[in-house]
């Protein structure tokens, strides 16, 4: 107004942080695995981190845009009695949400082998088969002192067979033996010991050539 004060007011609208929400922050799976849906709602682009080094868990996608997105969470079957967990971090702008994915392990582990002592190997070596009966992942180990024993394969899931291969025994006098193990389970370890014996190698005798005297000396 005339003779009065003139005041100007400047208004500035601050952009709000990205809105971010999920349908669940915890997902639980049984040892058989399966698929569940993570639903992400956001008004900006988002990303999911936390999968590095995790092979049992897969996501349908790890980034997306504004709106509502359904992301499949796929968990593989567990072959161990230990539970496993993964922590996922969903980020959109300045907002983030942590989501936990967990899976229970097998309630019990069963493991047996067809023999605790294999038939004795001949001195020149050979191969024999050991049958493994198991409801989980199993591992076979040979001690470093018994490098003459090879296991094919040394890992399996469920029932299977191990081909036990022995090289020739370098000794012609001494029998040799060693024990390798098959194990399964992490929380409650099951173990089978298998004894391997090998006879000494047969001594190879090279016959001497017959003596042929000088006929001039036989007169």
Image (cartoon, grey):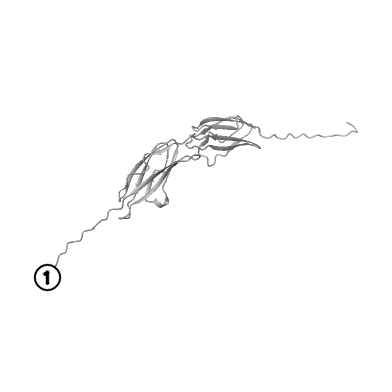
Toward the viewer: 120 or 148? 120
The tally of labels here is: 1
122 with respect to 157 (left or right): left
Secondary structure under tag 1 reads helix
Residue annotated with mark 1: 217
**In the displayed structure image, the side of residue 123 where residue 67 appears, left or right:** right
Residue at the location (40% across, 38% down)?
112
> Horizontal and vertical percent for residue 41?
62, 30
Q: Does 117 sit left or right of 34 as displayed?
A: left
Q: Residue at x 40, y 46 (%)?
A: 180
Residue 116 is situated, as x and y percent measured from the top left of the image, at 37, 42
Q: Where's the C terminus, which quadrant?
A: bottom left
Please give the name of the residue rendered at 54% of the width and 30% of the height, measured from the top-left corner: 36
Residue 19 placement: quadrant: top right
Residue furthest out toward the left: 219
Which image quadrant is residue 154 in? Answer: top left
Query: Around disc 1, counting alpha carbons within 10 Å, would you say few (fewer than 14), some (14 to 19), or many (20 or more)?
Result: few
Question: What is the residue that sits farthest to the right in this orientation?
Answer: 3
Whether residue 42 sits left or right of residue 83 in the image: it is right
Q: Nearer the viewer, residue 1 or 111?
A: 111
State which quarter of the image contains the N terminus.
Answer: top right
Pinpoint residue 67: horizontal percent, then vertical percent.
Answer: 61, 30
User: Which is nearer the eye, 67 or 182?
Assistant: 182
């Amino acid at each position: 107004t005339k003779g009065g004060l003139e005041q100007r007011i400047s208004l500035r609208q601050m952009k709000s942080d990205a809105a971010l929400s999920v349908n669940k922050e915890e997902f639980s799976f049984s040892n058989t695995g399966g698929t569940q849906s993570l639903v992400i709602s956001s008004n900006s682009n988002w990303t999911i981190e936390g999968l590095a080094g995790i092979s049992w868990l897969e996501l349908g996608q790890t980034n997306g845009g504004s709106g509502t997105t359904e992301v499949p969470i796929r968990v593989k079957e567990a072959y161990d009695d230990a539970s496993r967990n993964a922590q996922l971090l969903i980020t959109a702008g300045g907002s983030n949400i942590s989501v936990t994915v967990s899976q229970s392990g097998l309630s019990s582990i069963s493991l047996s082998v067809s023999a605790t002592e294999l038939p004795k190997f001949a001195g020149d070596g050979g191969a024999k088969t050991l049958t493994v009966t198991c409801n989980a992942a199993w591992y076979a180990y040979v001690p470093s002192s018994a490098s003459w024993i090879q296991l094919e394969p040394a890992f399996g899931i469920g029932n299977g067979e191990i081909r036990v291969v022995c090289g020739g025994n370098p000794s012609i006098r001494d029998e040799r033996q060693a024990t390798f193990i098959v194990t399964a389970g992490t929380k409650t370890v099951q173990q089978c010991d298998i004894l391997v014996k090998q006879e000494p190698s047969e001594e190879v005798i090279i016959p001497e050539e017959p003596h042929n005297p000088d006929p001039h000396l036989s007169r």
